[in-house]
C-alpha cells in the first residue's frame, strides 16, 4: 500500500464528515480520461461543505484546485498535489428570480441551465445548451458558442 503523504495524514486525522478520496485518479474526472492521482479529492454536497473545505485548505496552507465536469482540463500524468474540489454532481440548485433572471449554482450543467431558462420562457442561454461542462466552469472559462458567451448574461461586479 502507498504511504500517506503529510497532507493526507493531516486530512485523515481530522475525521471530517465529508466525501474525500485519497489518490483519486484525475483521469476518472476529465473528458479526455487523462491525469494521474489527485493527492486528495473532495466531493462537497452543499455550500456549507464547500465553505468548510475552502477554510480547511487555507488552514492547512495547501494548494486547492476546483474541478467542474473536467471538460477543459488537461491533468498531468504525475498527478496533482494538494486538494482538488470536484463540483460536478454537487451544488446543483437553480431558482427563478424576479425580473426575468435565474440563479444557478456552480455544479449545474450548462445544458440543464439552458433548459431551465427556456422552460421559464427566458432567452439568453440558448448558445450554452450544446457546451459540455458546468456553469462554474463556463463562467471561469467564459464559455461560448454561436456568438453567445457567458459574460453577456452574467451580472457584473
Ligand atoms: C466536446 C467538447 C466540446 C466543447 N465545446 C465548447 C464550446 O463550444 N464552447 C466553449 O466555450 N467550450 C467548449 N468546450 C470546452 C468546455 O466545455 C468549457 O470550457 C466548459 O466551460 C468547461 O466547464 P467544466 O465544468 O468542464 O470545467 P472544467 O474543465 O472542470 O474546468 C475548467 C477550468 O475552470 C475552473 N473551474 C471549474 N469550475 C469552477 C468553479 N465552480 N469555480 C471556479 N473555477 C472553476 C477549473 O479550475 C479549470 O481551470 C468543449 C469541450 C469539449 C470536450
Image (cartoon, rainbow, N blue to C red):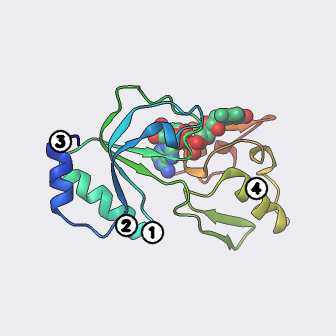
Residue 114 image label: 4
Where disc 1 sits, the SS reads loop
Q: Are marks 2 and 1 in contact (CB under 8 Å)?
A: yes
Q: Position of residue 143 (x, y in %)?
A: 65, 38
Work out whether residue 142 can be spotted. Answer: no
Q: Earlier in the sequence, mark 1 or mark 4?
A: 1
Q: Nearer the viewer, residue 118 or 84?
A: 84
The residue mark sitting in front, 4 or 3, is 3
Q: Is residue 8 above or below residue 55?
A: above
Query: What's the residue at 40%, 32% (across, down)?
Result: 36
Q: Specify whether 144 is left or right of 121.
A: left
- SS of the residue at dot 2? helix
Mark 2 CB near ligand 1 (8 Å cut): no
Tell me the number on the disc at residue 3. Answer: 3
- Mark closer to the chain start, 4 or 3: 3
- Circle 1 residue: 46
Label 1 vs label 4, nearer the camera:
1
Q: Earlier in the sequence, mark 2 or mark 4?
A: 2
Kind of element beneath mark 3: loop
SS at mark 4?
helix
* Label number found at residue 49: 2
Mark 3 vs mark 1, foreground winner is: 3
Q: Is residue 114 left or right of residue 84?
A: right
Res. 127 in view: yes
Gap in angstroms between the C-alphas marked 4 and 3: 45 Å
Split into quadrants, the picture shows ligand 1 in the one at top right
For the point 22% across and 40% down, which residue is it? 2
Amino acid at each position: 500500500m502507498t504511504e500517506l503523504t503529510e497532507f493526507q495524514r493531516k486530512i485523515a486525522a481530522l475525521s471530517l464528515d465529508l466525501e474525500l478520496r485519497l489518490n483519486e485518479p484525475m483521469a476518472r474526472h476529465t473528458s479526455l480520461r487523462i491525469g494521474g492521482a489527485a493527492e486528495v479529492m473532495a466531493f462537497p454536497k452543499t455550500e456549507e461543505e464547500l465553505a468548510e473545505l475552502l477554510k480547511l485548505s487555507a488552514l492547512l496552507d495547501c494548494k486547492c484546485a476546483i474541478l467542474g465536469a473536467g471538460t477543459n482540463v488537461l491533468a498531468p500524468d504525475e498527478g496533482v498535489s494538494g486538494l482538488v474540489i470536484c463540483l460536478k454532481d454537487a451544488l446543483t440548485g437553480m431558482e427563478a428570480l424576479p425580473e426575468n433572471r435565474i440563479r444557478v449554482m456552480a455544479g449545474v450543467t450548462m445544458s440543464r441551465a439552458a433548459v431551465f431558462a427556456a422552460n421559464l420562457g427566458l432567452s439568453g442561454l440558448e448558445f450554452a445548451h450544446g457546451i459540455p461542462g458546468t456553469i462554474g466552469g463556463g463562467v471561469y472559462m467564459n464559455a461560448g458558442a454561436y456568438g453567445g458567451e457567458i459574460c453577456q448574461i452574467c451580472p457584473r461586479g
